[in-house]
């Protein structure tokens, strides 16, 4: 099986960041790019541009942990923070926009 050159990983919490980053290292091709995505999921009644500093800090912390592992494996990393009312739809849109199969 051919290893992917572009991998997208959705990260929800710090607990899973280490495990999923390790999985990306074992799965991706050498010199692949790993897109680490955390979705700040907001209630439907909350505007997507609302200030949520605690959630933003958490997102940065989660991405930092995973990015450190990905870089140690020699892979390229692109951390992404999205805001959405539905995380699943946001992740699917990100896959389509980045043309990751």
Image (spheres, rainbow, N blue to C red):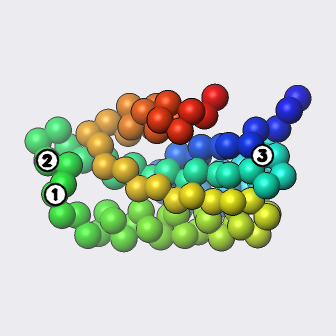
Q: Position of residue 13 (x, y in %)?
A: 49, 56
Instruction: Give the residue displayed 57% in from the left and 33% down from the top.
Output: 99
User: Tag 2, which secondary structure?
Assistant: loop
* Number of numbered labels in the structure image: 3
Q: Local crowd at mark 3 within 10 Å, few (<14), some, or many (≥20)?
A: some
- Indicate which disc, 3 or 1, sits on the residue closer to the N terminus: 3
**Residue 85: x, y in percent?**
26, 39
**Residue at the spot of label 1:** 50
Q: Quadrant of the N terminus?
A: top right
- Camera-near label (3 vs 2) is 3
Q: Residue at x 59, y 68 (%)?
A: 65
Precedes in sequence: disc 3 or disc 2: 3
Residue density around tag 1, few if under 14, some if 14–19, many if 20 or more, within 10 Å: few
Relative to 43, 92 lies left or right: right
Q: Residue at x 55, y 70 (%)?
A: 64
Quadrant where the C terminus lies?
A: top right
Q: Which residue is mark 3?
A: 28
Secondary structure beneath disc 1? loop
Residue occupying the point 74% across, 59% down: 75
Q: Which mark is residue 42?
A: none
Image mark for residue 46 = 2
Instruction: Give the CA separation, mark 3 to mark 1.
Output: 35 Å
Whether pointer 3 and pointer 1 mark residues with C-beta atoms closer than 8 Å, the reply is no
- Quadrant assignment, res 18: bottom right
Q: Are marks 2 and 1 in contact (CB under 8 Å)?
A: yes
């Amino acid at each position: 099986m051919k290893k992917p050159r572009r991998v997208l990983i959705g990260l929800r919490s710090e607990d899973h960041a280490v495990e999923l980053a390790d999985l990306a290292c074992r799965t991706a091709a050498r010199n692949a790019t790993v897109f680490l995505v955390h979705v700040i999921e907001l209630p439907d009644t909350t505007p997507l541009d609302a200030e949520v500093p605690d959630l933003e800090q958490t997102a940065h912390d989660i991405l930092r942990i995973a990015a450190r592992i990905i870089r140690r494996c020699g892979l390229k990393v692109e951390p992404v923070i999205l805001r959405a009312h539905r995380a699943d739809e946001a992740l699917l849109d990100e896959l389509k926009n980045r043309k990751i199969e």
